[in-house]
Image (spheres, helix red, strand yellow):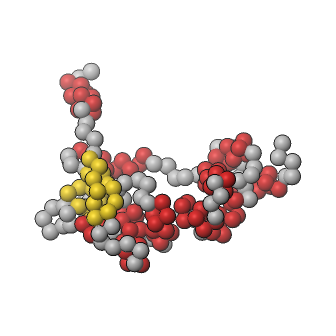
Amino acid sequence: MTDIQSATAVDAVRATPMERIKVRLGDVGLAPENMRFDEPADDGVPQLADTVLAAGILFPPILRRGRKGEQPFMTLDGRRRRFGLLHLRDRGDITDDYEFEALLAVTKAQQAAAIFLPNTESAPVHVANVIMAIGKFRKARMDTTTIARALGYEELEIKRLEALASVHPTVLNALRQGRLTLKQVRLFARVPDKK
């Protein structure tokens, strides 16, 4: 191991975790270094806002302290969550005084990681996982509207996918692995004998 590799390994072990803080919505802006800074809010933001209203912010946004001429905190990761909160504010559900938990990136390394890593380390949710979640929510006696808000789907789509929640877990696992299509899973759902 070279001296540089050794120093990097030691730094990685000593890496300081980001600080968990509570911030006011009115104190949070969008950092220009955010990878999607120039992109406007997409059509899915109102649905995300409904999910946030129903379940809160599940993954805290990552912020840095504001610089001269900026808001007190600036969003490095969490642009859509911020847009969702702004949508709720504009709709009158919350105010600028709404507080939420966030992570504060203090060091340059933390800030660089916050800009890049969240976009590369997460994978999209597979429809098989959504189907399984719908089944669990139904067992917990949640209604369609609540499920739709929690998962960020339209109610009609929840009703369509709910019919597939009763298929055997092996079928959903095959769907997740790409060995079955959604159409084939729908055919399994019509089979009266689940065994």
Residue located 29% across and 56% down the image: 22
Q: In the rendered view, does 10 fall on the left or right side of 38?
A: left
Q: In this rendering, does residue 11 appear at all?
A: yes
Residue located 29% across and 69% down the image: 97
- The residue nearer to you, when weighing 5 against 109, is 109
Q: In the rendered view, does 102 fall on the left or right side of 126?
A: left
Residue located 64% across and 46% down the image: 176
Residue 5 sits in which quadrant? top left
Above or below, 13 against 165 in this view is above
- The residue nearer to you, when weighing 110 against 144, is 144
**Name of the residue lying farthest toward the bottom:** 91
Count of numbered circles in the view:
0
The location of residue 38, given as percent across then percent down, is 33, 68
Residue located 80% across and 51% down the image: 188
**Name of the residue lying farthest toward the left:** 68
**Name of the residue lying farthest toward the right:** 193
The location of residue 101, given as percent across then percent down, is 33, 56
**Name of the residue lying farthest toward the top:** 1
Residue 141 sits in which quadrant? bottom right
Above or below, 152 against 59 in this view is below
The location of residue 143, given as percent across then percent down, is 64, 64
The location of residue 113, given as percent across then percent down, is 30, 47
Which quarter of the figure is the N terminus placed in?
top left
Which quarter of the figure is the C terminus placed in?
top right
Q: In this rendering, does residue 112 appear at all?
A: no
